[in-house]
Image (cartoon, rainbow, N blue to C red):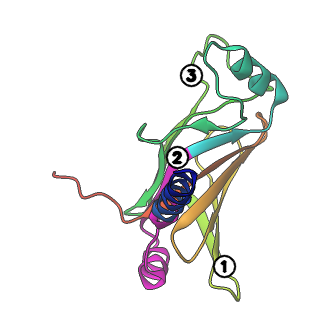
Amino acid sequence: MKKIITIFSIFSVFLFLQNCSAQGKSDPQVVNNLLNSEEFTFYAEKALPYNQDVINIAYSMPNAAAQRIFDLSGEGYSIEIKNKVLDVVMPYFGRTYNPSYGSTDNSYRFTSKDFTLTKTQNKKGNWTVKIKPNDIKNSLQIFIEISKSGSASASIQSNDRQPITYNGYVAKNEETEE
């Protein structure tokens, strides 16, 4: 009986890991086409703040997970590049050095029509995209590291906040009815 339970457990773990690795996979040609068209969306699934105070506060919450990663899947946080417009809707967890007086919004929410996008591809086929918005108040840069399979990691660095990293994936922009 123990052998059957052991075999069943190993088989279940194998299926679980196989299912997890299948998520977020795209054809490398599709990823290349998205990046060459410069019209794609980064969807955030997890946030990884650098500030230890934020992590300590998260641990002190009731029923908090014992990790420094915040789950964002299903919340609709994204960085979208479409029709030469950059639209950023991302949460922020960390220290702000120069907060605006009376402001309660601590996230990255802006639209930019004047930005610089540079992209490079390494020998293994992975991409690095650097985005620098020129028409927003605070100086910031967005770096997105994209693998051949479409999984990605985005980092936002600003002159008035600590940096933060997000894990997720890139995909084709959603079609909107106008």
Residue 90 lies, in percent from the top left, at 54, 39
The disc, 3 or 1, on the residue closer to the chain's N-terminal end is 3
Q: Earlier in the sequence, mark 2 or mark 1?
A: 2
114 left or right, relative to 75: right
Magenta part of the chain? 20-45
Which residue corresponds to the image point at 45% horizontal and 61% vertical from the top-left? 19
Q: Closest to the observer: 81 or 51? A: 51
Alpha carbon distance from label 3 to label 1 = 33 Å
Residue drawn at the location 79% of the way across and 38% of the way down: 50
Indicate left or right for 62 with 36 as reference.
right
Between disc 2 and disc 1, the foreground one is: 2
Task: Name the residue tied to disc 1.
Answer: 120
Could you tell me if the residues under marks 2 and 1 are in contact, i.e. CB atoms within 8 Å? no
Q: Which mark is residue 45?
A: 2
- Three-letter amino acid code at the position of disc 1: Thr
- Residue 93 in the image: above or below residue 169: above
Q: Is residue 106 visible?
A: yes
Amino acid type of the residue tagged 3 in the rendering = Asp
Q: In the image, residue 18 lies at what x, y percent?
A: 49, 65
